[in-house]
Amino acid sequence: MSGHSKWNNIKRKKEKTDGAKAQIFTKIGREIAVAVKSGGGDPDNNSTLKMLIAKAKANNVPNDNIERIIKKAMGDGDRNSYENIVYEGYGPGGVAVIVECLTDNRNRTAGDVRHTFDKFGGNLGTTGCVSFSFKEKGIFIINNEDGQYSEEKIMEDVMEAGADDFSMEDDMVEVTCEPSAFNNVLEALQGLGYSFETAELQMVPDTYVSLTDEEQIRKMGLLLEKLEDNDDVQSVWHNCDTLGDE
């Protein structure tokens, strides 16, 4: 649920414990429920829901769980009223951080997020203070550990699917597209037989920051960890590319 720090978000996700996976399931389930209540339970007529179902499957959420969440939301089984709030700020060393939340208590969430930034050497900023340096993109990560996909094969399929670009590194393939093309690219790649480690809209930074101070690296890691552990936080985006090198 965190990134986009090149390949670091995938490496972190692979190391998630069962407890952390359960938390991810819960957070994605909340997003799905909100999407259903605002746009209906048919993914063919609700593009946000379709994207979230792909995201859930990429995070190994069982189909039964997804269907149960949709049915419950359609029946108004969860009466909590959540609102989307986005916080922006800086981590140690000036790392840009965007925190996306779904909360039923704005004051609680704001206080918790501010406290976490302060505790680990960062500071919460004003709306727009860092988001101008990020762009929203559709991101698909494909596992290529066994080398089954050649660069030529990926290029041909990516172009056919209508994506913008791709890159290959660390046994992973990253495919990018415009947000408006996400669902079309998703369906096209699935039709070509691909499955995904990640399939979601992400906030991708224009440039990255490399921390060199060990204490700043430590605090940045803790800042991300504590934000991700907050039940109200759905996603954390940042531009630090140092953490994967620890």
Image (tube, rainbow, N blue to C red):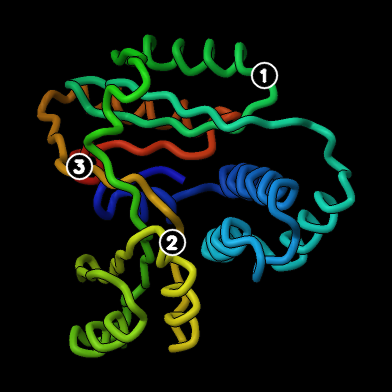
Q: Label 1: which residue?
A: 105
Q: Residue 202 at x, y = what percent?
A: 38, 50
Q: Residue 26 at x, y = what percent?
A: 67, 44
| Secondary element at tag 2 | strand
Residue 60 visible from this viewpoint: no
Image quadrant assignment for residue 106: top right
Q: Label 3: which residue?
A: 241
Residue lying at 35% horizontally and 16% vertically, measured from the top left = 126
Q: Are marks 2 and 3 in contact (CB under 8 Å)?
A: no
Question: Is 5 placed above or below 165 here?
Answer: above
Image quadrant assignment for residue 109: top right
Residue lying at 24% horizontally and 45% vertically, measured from the top left = 244
Q: Residue 51 at x, y = what percent?
A: 54, 61
Q: Label 2: which residue?
A: 198
| Secondary element at tag 1 | loop
Q: Residue 221 at x, y = what percent?
A: 33, 30
Q: Given the image, on which type of amino acid does mark 2 rest? A: Thr
Q: Is residue 54 left or right of residue 221?
A: right
